[in-house]
Amino acid sequence: MKLVWHLAKQSWKSLLAAGLLGGMSGVTNVALLAIVHRALQQPATSSSKLLVLFVICCLASLVTRIASQLFLTWMTQHSISRLRLDLCQRILGSPLSHLEEIGSHRMLGALTGDVLVVAQAFTGIPMLCVNAVILISGAIYLGILSQTLLIGALLFAVLGGWSYWFVSRFASPYLRQGRDLQDVLMRHVRSLIQGVKEMKLHRDRRHEFIEGVVTPLEEEYRQTQFVGTCIQDAAITWGRLLFLIAIGALLFAWPKIQTVDAATLTGYTLAIFYLMSPL
């Protein structure tokens, strides 16, 4: 996280620009949702003004989305390059004893895999802002339709977020273990590259290295990553299932408790389906 915030401080202008463009795209998408809902309410009397607004919002969403993606692509490549150069400078400036304690396999893993992970986390900040804008705009739109239903939708959202966190936290130990196993694998791969001539001359040693060292580690790494990823996927699936439960309760249970017009139900159903993605 320190590296992510370090990059954010250095590139806050680019982050702000990408976030603003993405936020504009999110607002136009919610506006499109409102226009579609309005057109569905009165399909026979939809005015040309509504059509013009629809076209304008489509073009605005397209332009802001493309501009935001270009910014994110540039930021990703720029942050990867900056991180690698910074890590190289830190390695050259660190005491030799400290580098020997860390190990070359960990430094190699940081320069190859960790840099990409940190860069993805860094470029995820604007997307987080975009999703926040979409959710806030969507909540405002839902509040305009019905404040009572908005409270129920927020309760479902809180329940979904908590349940996702509760399930996904069981994946963290497996993912951390997988990262440690990856460091060990990198160390053995480095040993293989450095001693490839000796391995070629000794068949038994070569067989022992592959079958007794690398293969068990690779199998353990694969299983660990598989379990961690499955838990994360289960958490995501459960969160999406809660959305479907909310839609079912909205369509079949709530009208029996309180009278709701069809236009409000249609608007809420469309909005919930749309808000599933950023959540």
Image (spheres, rainbow, N blue to C red):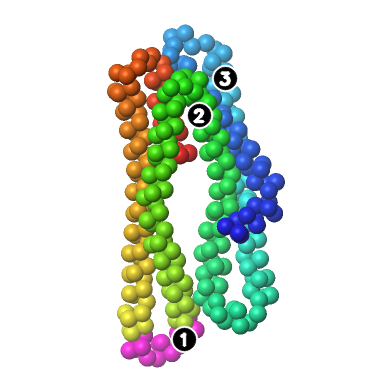
Q: Mark 2 or mark 3, which is nearer the start of the sequence?
A: 3
Q: CA distance from mark 1 to mark 3?
A: 68 Å
Instruction: Select label 3 or label 2 by which is in front.
Output: 2
For the magenta stretch, what is the residue range?
193-206
- Does residue 274 appear left or right of residue 130 in this picture? left
The dot on residue 53 is 3
The image shows residue 214, relative to residue 274, as above or below, that is below
The residue that disc 2 covers is 138
State whether residue 12 appears in this view.
Answer: yes
Numbered disc 1: secondary structure: loop
- Say which amino acid is labelled 1: Gly
Front-lying residue, 54 or 132: 132
Check if mark 1's residue and mark 3's residue have beta carbons within 8 Å. no
Residue 19 among magenta residues: no
Is the residue marked by circle 1 packed among few (<14), some (14-19), or many (20+) residues within 10 Å? few
Disc 1 to disc 2, how far (Cα)? 60 Å
Looking at the picture, does residue 158 appear above or below residue 206?
above
Which quadrant of the view contains residue 275? top left
Circle 1 residue? 195
Q: Residue furthest top?
A: 45
Which residue type carries mark 3? Leu
Give the mark nearest the N terminus, 1 or 2.
2
The picture quadrant where one finds residue 64 is: top right
202 magenta-colored: yes
Badge 3: few (under 14), some or many (20 or more) residues near its Cα, within 10 Å?
some
Amino acid type indicated by mark 2: Gly
Expressed as whole percent of the image width and height from the top left, the position of residue 2 reads 60, 59
